[in-house]
Every structure is written in structure tokens, then in C-alpha cells.
Amino acid sequence: EDQVTQSPEALRLQEGESSSLNCSYTVSGLRGLFWYRQDPGKGPEFLFTLYSAGEEKEKERLKATLTKKESFLHITAPKPEDSATYLCAVQDSKAAGNKLTFGGGTRVLVKP
Amino acid sequence: DTAVSQTPKYLVTQMGNDKSIKCEQNLGHDTMYWYKQDSKKFLKIMFSYNNKELIINETVPNRFSPKSPDKAHLNLHINSLELGDSAVYFCASSQAGHRGEKLFFGSGTQLSVL
């Protein structure tokens, strides 16, 4: 069974204080690893897809990296508007459909 | 123009009632999903339809019945609601494909069973 574990559960940062979020995963065959951002009262919003170990993707202050067992989401010089829950999910190439298996998320709070 | 829209946003009801949540996507996607997010914020797949055909049916009580009248709509009907059904339900859609297709999510329906 696919498993996704995210750490830490919560992260408090000062504005400008860079940090990293971890996503460890177990999957039969990785079709893709996804990062989403979720704001309170809203649905998850897509950030990145990573397909193979060694791949990196960047968007503004966010950078996602992937190894064979984990992914990191690096937040560089965060701003208060980066406060959200960040969700990691995997798609298993051996599973039916394109279902995503999610981790529990990391709640990030960036204080000015 | 909202890509994946679901109604209602909030649903408060009594135990034992039957309720429905509606979802529509205007992205032209082939596949639609229902996810449940519990109080600990874990998102879990419930169902998936591809072109009106059920392709994923996780271990969900049979009080939950999805219905897809066409590939742009996926509704969720829940019979005999229980306290444990209280959660946020998200509809999502994606293009069918072999290479990690991303899902687009609606804004959720917060169901409270009293």
C-alpha cells in the first residue's frame, strides 16, 4: 500500500527565514510526486509535479526536489503570504486511475 | 469562471438524513474524483469516474453512492447520515493519461452531521 509521511506537522517561521519541508514516500512504482498548497477553507492548489529522482522544480520562493525515497519543498526567504498547509501526494503507476495518495500536510506559518 | 465547482459549500443536517453534493468541471477532463478530508486534514480518495465509468471505489460504506450523468458532472449522494460522516468533501478532476496528470480540486463542501 502506498504511504506518504510529511514532516514536520507544523512550522513557524519568521519572514525571511528559509526552511525545508520533508515528504517521505513508499510506492510500488512512482508515476509522479505532487506538491499542493491548501489555504483555509479552500481546495488544494497545484504547485509542482516531479517524475524522477534528481528532478527539481522552482516557482517563486519554492523549490521542490525528489529522490527515490523522499521529496523536499524548500521555502527561500518566505513571506507571510506563503503561510498555508503544504500537501505532498504520490501517484502509483500500478494503481487504477490517476488517484493521489496524500500525506498529512505541513502547516506553515510565516510571521512578519 | 471556476474550473471545478461544487455545491453546497456548507451542509448542516441531522443524523439519519439523506443529502447530496454536486460537482461540475468545465475543464474538459475525462476523470473526476471524490476525496474526503477528515478533522486531521488527511485527504483520502473515495471514488473516481472516467468518462462516466466507475474506476476507483475505495473502502467506503455503501451509504455513499456516486453518480456521473456525464463526464463533466459527478455527484455524491449519502444515505442515513452518521456523526462520523462529518468532514470536508472535495471534488476533483484530471485529464486521463499515463504520465502523472495533476488533479484540480473544488473548494470543498463542509458537511456537519448533528
Image (spheres, rainbow, N blue to C red):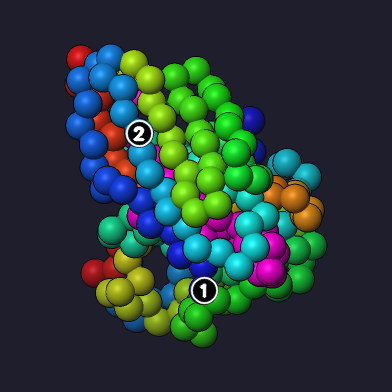
Name the amino acid, label 2.
Answer: Ser
B13, above or below A111, in the image? below
Give the crowd class for mark 2: few <14, some 14-19, many >=20 residues within 10 Å: some
Q: CA distance from mark 2 to mark 1?
A: 26 Å
Left or right, B98 with reference to B1: right
- Residues behind callouts 2 and 1 on a single chain: yes
Residue A20 is labelled as 2
B113, above or below A110, in the image? below
Task: Give the residues in magenta.
Answer: A80-104
Q: Position of residue A12 (x, y in %)?
A: 20, 32
A74, above or below B59, in the image? above
Residue drawn at point x = 76 percent, y = 71 percent:
B53
Give the crowd class for mark 1: few <14, some 14-19, many >=20 residues within 10 Å: few
Left or right, B73 with reference to A60: right
Q: Is residue A7 visible?
A: yes
Residue drawn at point x = 78 percent, y = 45 percent:
B28
Question: Would residue B58 be counted in the magenta stretch?
Answer: no
Residue A39 is labelled as none
Chain to which mark 1 belongs: A
Question: Would residue A82 be counted in the magenta stretch?
Answer: yes
Q: Position of residue B3 (x, y in %)?
A: 64, 38
Q: Position of residue B38 (x, y in %)?
A: 34, 62
Give the quarter of the image for residue A56: top right
Left or right, A35 with reference to A82: right
The residue under label 1 is A1
Instruction: Give the camera-side residue of A88 and A51.
Output: A51
Instruction: Give the camera-side residue of A59 and B54.
Output: A59
